[in-house]
Amino acid sequence: MMTRIYIYILIAALVSTIIRVLPVTIFRKPIKNRFVRSFLYYVPFVTLAVMTFPAIIDATQVKLAGILALIVGTIAAWFRQSLFTVAVLCCVVVFLVELIPIL
Amino acid sequence: MNNSKTKKQIFLEGIKDGFPIGLGYFAVAFSLGILARKAGLNPVQGFINSFLNHASAGEYAVYTVIKEGATFLEMAIMTLVVNARYLLMSTALSQKFDTKTSIFQRILVGFGVTDEIFAITIKRPGFVEPLYNHGAFLIAAPCWAMGTALGIIAGELMPVRIVSALSVALYGMFLACIMPEARKHNIVAALIIVSFILSYIANRAAIFSGISSGTKTIILTVVIASAAAILFPHPEVEDDD
């Protein structure tokens, strides 16, 4: 299992490094294909959204805590709070909600 | 490139701008460490993975794949899909450096691409001196890697309540990455809602229970993003956001 973990890490590192390094070294002009550009533009938002929900409500001890963290986090992010602020706010919401004994 | 500044000054500017990024990374990486521990990684493996992959969503994918014991091919595809945005960022960055910039410098800049470093690079006017990026990366990446390692170590000592609270930090960060763009573009906002709904269905419906969550993410991403690209081709994709 130890070796397997290192292989997983190496594969991920290799792929992510190729993704990061190739365009900046090869392209001097932007990609022209409209579909590819649009697809690449939409990918991060879809991926991150899919990974966030419903995972956020399954991550906490109490479901309501996760739901409230999602709502508070969305509002804070909407108002362009920093990565750090949004992350901390979500944590605080979960911590406070889970302190309520009846839940 | 601003010729009135010395290379040392530019490098120090990078370090200065990298510092708040590093602080934010530390907290988020800590919660990634908790996840890494659940996937069976030790602190050294967490540190190495974080230093080499330095991507929140990308690492989240790595730990999910390891935890599920998925195939190496799934690991490669998952990394490709989750980090696909770096293709676009790296392409945009290729325009931000002088054509005289050496390949070696470009490789280093490319390796250091993260959402936040991309953001601060693209904000700089004119051509960017690669040393700026190296400075920012040199402060941010170790914070990220240390945060992960400490999350793996201290996650075990922490009360369940604290771990539960920290486990949502990552999702908070994902929200912080996608919502500002959703505010600017209605299509992105609609896509996020569609993604939430389809993801919920894919996770809860019994017929999909045989598919791993990594594969679900890949399929949903390709399907939704392709549909969006066909239906709403982004008129002039901004390279600078």
Image (cartoon, coloured by chain):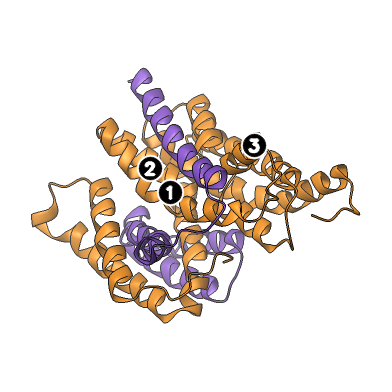
Chain colours: A purple, B orange
From the viewer's perspective, tell me whether residue B136 is left or right of residue B90: right
Farthest bottom residue? B186
Q: Earlier in the sequence, mark 2 or mark 3?
A: 2
Which subunit holds the residue at mark 3? B
Against B117, residue B182 (above or below) is below
Q: Picture coordinates of residue B58 (x, y %)?
A: 43, 45
> What's under tag 1, amino acid-wise?
Asn
From the viewer's perspective, tell me whether residue A63 is left or right of residue A37: left
> What's under tag 3, amino acid-wise?
Pro
Q: Quadrant of the N terminus of chain B?
A: bottom right
Q: Nearer the viewer, residue B230 or B86?
A: B230
Q: Secondary structure at mark 1?
A: loop
Inter-mark Cα distance, 1 to 2: 6 Å
Circle 1 residue: B83
- Contact flag, marks 3 and 1 (Cβ < 8 Å): no
- The quadrant holding residue B85 is bottom left
Q: Secondary structure at mark 2?
A: helix
> What's under tag 2, amino acid-wise?
Thr
Q: Nearer the viewer, mark 3 or mark 1?
A: 1
Q: Nearer the viewer, residue A62 or B226?
A: B226
Q: Earlier in the sequence, mark 3 or mark 1?
A: 1
Q: Secondary structure at mark 3?
A: helix
10 Å crowding of disc 1: few (<14), some (14-19), many (20+) = many
- The quadrant holding residue B208 is bottom left
Farthest left residue? B207
Q: Picture coordinates of residue B166 (x, y %)?
A: 49, 51
Circle 2 residue: B79
- Contact flag, marks 1 and 2 (Cβ < 8 Å): yes
Which subunit holds the residue at mark 1? B
Q: Who's the residue at 52% across and 64% down the image?
A: B176
Mark linked to residue B142: 3
